[in-house]
Amino acid sequence: MAAKPPRKRTGKPARGGPRRDAPAARPPHKAPEPARPRKPRESREPRARRGEDWIYGRHAVGAALANPARQLERLVLTRDGEETLAETGIQPRIRPEIRTNQEISALLPEGAVHQGFALKAAPLAEKHLETVIAELAEGAPATIVVLDQVTDPRNVGAILRSAAAFGALAVILPERHGADTTAALAKAASGALESVALVRVTNVARALETMKNAGFWTVGLAARASETLASVDLTGRIALVLGAEGSGLRRLVAETCDIRARLPISDAMESLNVSAAAACALYEVARNRR
């Protein structure tokens, strides 16, 4: 086989002189100037996530101020808010800062309806389920609400409010796929976060078994259940179990319940909002007790 001819190299400079098309020589490398130190930015929380460590709204702030378990950090009021707080008789443990509505809004989440009240406070310590049960007197009736994958903080806040109104002992959420304790939750709870225990558990089905062992009758709300809630004996210790709107209770959670019951709603609607369903169920339990 004939050998391949040597490949020609293009652009080779003529011997003894520079290449005509050679690029211009680069300037010698210059070390970069040291970065100028940035001026410290004004202390401001990011717009998208700001204010989630605040409690706002007249009822939520008033209840937190009246709760000795709350560690208070900063209280901000309008002049009208200060006068309204004085009328309630609540003596705040920290000196309030007086600000305009606009200045308070700048501290809080976008669109927060604060009514001239904002309180920065440390979160309440959440109780363990075993502690909540141990604090019950022997044989005493009680109601606990169990939420399976309810993630909307406003729904959970509204359920806490209904739980307080109808004398429930606690609201239970899973640690994963459960609503975080945000400012929006506290506002929707309208002060109930201070009086109803919020309990987080790693496994909802296991928590139901714990309550059964403590004498609770576990009742899961399910749209297609054969029995109505009104036909169930709701005296004694009751755990009302509600699932996320749309998907409802997960299979294992539903199977762990002692009984499944439905609210007798019209065929015109497939389901109720979970907070509305919880209010109806809590009323039915309270009505049975009385």
Image (cartoon, helix red, strand yellow):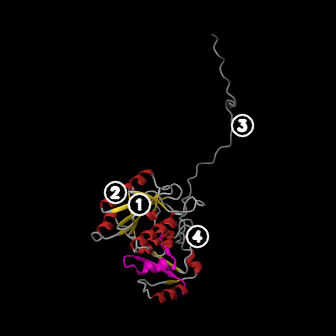
Q: Residues within 10 Å of mark 2 (few under 14, many from 20)?
A: some
| 243 versus 95 height, above or below | above
Q: Residues within 10 Å of mark 4 (few under 14, many from 20)?
A: few
Q: Secondary structure at mark 4?
A: loop
What numbered label is drawn on residue 268?
none
Q: Amino acid at mark 3?
A: Asp
What numbered label is drawn on residue 21?
3
Residue 140 location in percent, x, y? 31, 71
Which circle, 3 or 4, is nearer the viewer? 4
Q: Amino acid at mark 1?
A: Val
The Cα atoms of the two marked residues, 2 and 1, are separated by 12 Å
What numbered label is drawn on residue 110?
4
Compare marks 3 and 4 and give the one earlier in the sequence.
Answer: 3
Q: Residues within 10 Å of mark 3 (few under 14, many from 20)?
A: few
Q: Amino acid at mark 2?
A: Glu
Q: Is residue 182 in view from this perspective?
A: no
Q: Secondary structure at mark 1?
A: strand
Q: Residue at x 64, y 45 (%)?
A: 26
Q: Name the residue tied to disc 2.
A: 209
Q: Is residue 35 left or right of residue 254?
A: right
Which circle, 3 or 2, is nearer the viewer? 2
Q: Nearer the viewer, residue 277 or 71?
A: 277
Q: Residues within 10 Å of mark 1 (few under 14, many from 20)?
A: many
Q: Residue at x 47, y 84 (%)?
A: 96
Q: Amino acid at mark 4?
A: Glu
